[in-house]
Amino acid sequence: MKGIFTLLVITAIITISRSSPQITVYPSLNTINQLATYVFTLNIGDPSILPGTATLNFDSSVYSFTNTSGITGCYDSTDNTALYNCYASTSSSISFTWSAAMGVQIYLNISSIKNPSYVSSFDVTLNFASNGGSTFTPVVGTVNSLQPDTLVSCSMTYSPSYANSYSAVTFSIVNTNLVPSGGSLQLTFNGYTPASSPSNLAISVATGAAYINTSTLTTSAGVYFGFNNFFKADLPASTSLKFTLSSFLNPPTTSSSNYSITILTYASTSYQNKID
């Protein structure tokens, strides 16, 4: 009697999941125009393609790197002694060698990067190319925590200075950062709503006539007045301006602790790119 043997072959399929490439970035100091250390968390997702070259591509309209031979202060934020050989591969890109010893995820600090000159969101793209020619789809991180700087100085005088009456208000300000031609001015009122129609406001200039457009279009929305295209020429940093708005409604009471006016200068007419 012959025996019949059945051989069962069981194949186990093991799926290995790899994390997706990713990048996060934030500056240690988020004030515009200031030098900051940029802190990155980077992951290429697939350690099998190491080593290779990673490149961080910044927005070329606001970032510029002039040192093409090397970037100082490029180190592992979890181990300050672990330095990376970072270099400016273009005027807006920083590259470094990513080796197998660095693992899948690294924490990279790059010091002395100058923040953009206005508030907005700026993308940083991570590219990676292995020494064997393998690449992955670039991934994008966003610098979105920038804040405007403050004015060097700001003061206001009212004439006459009676509560709840119309007067001429003279503003004396010194800006911190350059405001480009076509930039706008916004006055935000805290604690009260001024006259509903700002179209009656007339602008006269005592200091800074070369920079201020007295025929600027004025808009309002609740507690602010906006002066579109207020600056008719580039306003250099630390420039003194003195201008007067007539037919301006004063606060309803004499209590100075309840009311204030905030002045913002902007790089565009959209009131989103804050300069000061």
Image (tube, rainbow, N blue to C red):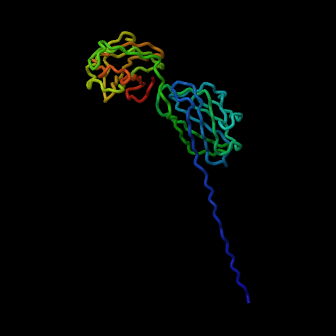
Which residue sits at x=40%, y=26%?
A: 268
Picture coordinates of residue 57, whole percent (x, y) = 56, 35
- The residue positioned farthest toward the bottom in the image shown: 1
Q: Residue at x 44, y 20 (%)?
A: 179
Residue that sits furthest to the right in the current view: 1
For this orientation, the residue located farthest to the front is 255
**Where does the image place residue 196, in percent across and percent down from the top left?**
26, 26
Q: Position of residue 10 (x, y in %)?
A: 66, 70
Q: Image height check: is 45 above or below 245?
A: below
In the rendered view, would you say 74 is above or below 137? Answer: above
Residue 200, given in percent of the width and then of the height, sits at 25, 19
> Can see residue 186?
no
Q: Quadrant of the C terminus?
A: top left
The quarter of the displayed image where residue 207 is located: top left
* Vertical placement of residue 252 versus 93, above or below: above
- Tell me the residue at 70%/44% (across/down): 100
Query: Which residue: 59% across, 32% down?
Result: 38
Q: Quadrant of the N terminus?
A: bottom right
> In which quarter of the view is residue 83 placed?
top right
For residue 237, say whether it is visible: yes
Residue toward you, 187 or 227: 187
On the rendered structure, is 60 left or right of 266?
Answer: right
Which residue occupies the extreme top position in the image? 206
Report the front residue among 56 and 273.
273
Residue 63 placement: quadrant: top right
Left or right of 194 in this view: 80: right
